[in-house]
Image (cartoon, helix red, strand yellow):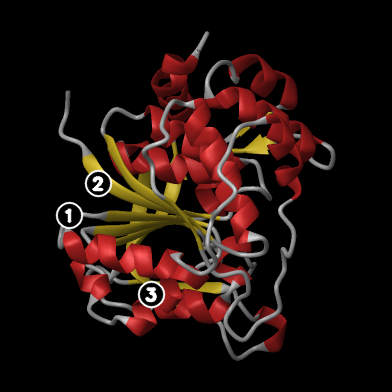
């Protein structure tokens, strides 16, 4: 088996269904050493319970899970609830998550393994922005930071994760991370499946939890867009996408564009953003990896 990659996941699981689809992939990926999961945005303790329910359904009670920040930095909360938490009554899970422990856990874990850890962020960046603010040495101690977030070409529209906490996003993009790669709506919107195909393909283990969570999502959505799973798969298979290199900054001045990601192409820029995706290859890889749960 290929060498495992130590990885931390920061997620707002419980709103869009793709976070749960992403965590399921990581639990199946043999190259992923999942060091822990942290939750962010409204109702982070309920989100931690959902993450725990998926891990338990996969037979992975060993995965550390910590509840994080529930409100953005100096900004209005856009998702105060965790709608998919309604399925928790039907699945075993821990419910003793202490509040506001995520940042401390991330800091300890990264410091314990300098230069080794990939941090994958698939929610608003409040936890990570605070982490980088309270310990400015931590960004340079990462191996890399991979995020689902932003919209870069043409870059005049907001995206949920980066605009969910624009100040925290600015702190993250401004940090000295050895490698920062962002997968924005430019590529993730190309990766969608309709409800019936998702119901057919989500079989076994944590997918049984995901299917129930997905029914909550389908109450107001006509498909699943695999935003977060694409970012996760690209940690291990980066050539699923092509990239442009440059510099990302957050719009924090114009009221009509507050929270928009602005990309400037630079040959030696500090950031890399997904520009195009082979969606067929991505889905093939995703379901090859997660096939281990079928019948489980």
Residue 131 circle label: 3
What residue lies at 70% left-to-right and 35% top-to-bottom?
213
Q: Looking at the image, is 235 positioned above or below residue 73? A: above
Q: Earlier in the sequence, mark 2 or mark 1?
A: 2
Q: Secondary structure at mark 1?
A: loop
Give the Cα distance between marks 2 and 3: 18 Å
- Label 3 CA crowd tier, 10 Å (few <14, some 14–19, many 20+): many
**Which residue is at the front of the view, 208 or 178?**
208
- Label 1 CA crowd tier, 10 Å (few <14, some 14–19, many 20+): some
Residue 116 circle label: 1
Location of residue 137 by image quarter? bottom left
Give the Cα distance between marks 1 and 3: 17 Å
Location of residue 246 by image quarter? bottom left
x and y, in percent, of residue 31 in the image? 26, 33
What residue lies at 49% left-to-right and 77% top-to-bottom?
168
What residue lies at 50% left-to-right and 68% top-to-bottom?
125
**Which residue is at the front of the view, 260 or 24?**
24
- Label 2 CA crowd tier, 10 Å (few <14, some 14–19, many 20+): some
Residue 222 circle label: none
x and y, in percent, of residue 181 in the image? 35, 58
Asked if labels 1 and 2 touch by Cβ distance under 8 angstroms, the answer is yes
Q: Residue beneath label 2, please?
A: 6
Q: Looking at the image, is 229 positioned above or below residue 257? A: above
What residue lies at 51% left-to-right and 55% top-to-bottom?
184
Q: Secondary structure at mark 2?
A: strand
Regarding residue 226, the answer to whether it shows in the image is no
Asked if labels 3 and 1 touch by Cβ distance under 8 angstroms, the answer is no
Regarding residue 140, the answer to whether it shows in the image is yes
Q: Secondary structure at mark 3?
A: helix
């Amino acid at each position: 088996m290929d060498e495992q990659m130590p990885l931390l996941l920061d997620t707002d699981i419980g709103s869009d269904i793709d976070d749960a689809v992403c965590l399921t992939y990581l639990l199946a990926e043999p190259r992923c050493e999942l060091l822990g999961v942290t939750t962010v945005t409204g109702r982070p303790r309920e989100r931690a319970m959902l993450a725990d329910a998926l891990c338990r359904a996969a037979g992975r009670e060993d995965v550390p899970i910590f509840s994080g920040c529930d409100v953005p930095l100096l900004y209005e909360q856009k998702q105060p609830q965790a709608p998919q938490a309604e399925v928790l009554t039907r699945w075993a899970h821990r419910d003793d998550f202490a509040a506001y422990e995520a940042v401390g856990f991330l800091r300890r874990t990264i410091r314990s393994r300098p230069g080794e850890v990939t941090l994958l962020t698939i929610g608003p960046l409040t936890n990570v922005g605070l982490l980088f603010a309270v310990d400015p040495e931590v960004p340079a101690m990462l191996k890399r930071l991979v995020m689902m977030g932003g919209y870069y070409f043409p870059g005049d529209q907001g995206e949920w994760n980066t605009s969910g906490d624009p100040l925290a996003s600015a702190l993250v993009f401004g940090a000295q991370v050895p490698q920062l790669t962002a997968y924005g709506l430019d590529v993730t919107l190309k990766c969608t499946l309709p409800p019936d195909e998702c119901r057919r393909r989500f079989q076994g283990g944590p997918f049984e939890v995901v299917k129930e969570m997905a029914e909550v999502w389908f109450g107001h959505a006509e498909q699943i867009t695999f935003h977060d799973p694409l970012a996760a798969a690209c940690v291990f298979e980066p050539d699923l996408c092509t990239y442009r290199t440059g510099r990302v900054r957050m719009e924090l001045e114009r009221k009509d564009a507050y929270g928009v990601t602005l990309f400037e192409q630079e040959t030696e820029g500090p950031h890399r953003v997904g520009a195009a995706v082979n969606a067929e290859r991505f889905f093939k890889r995703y379901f090859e990896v997660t096939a281990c749960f079928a019948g489980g």
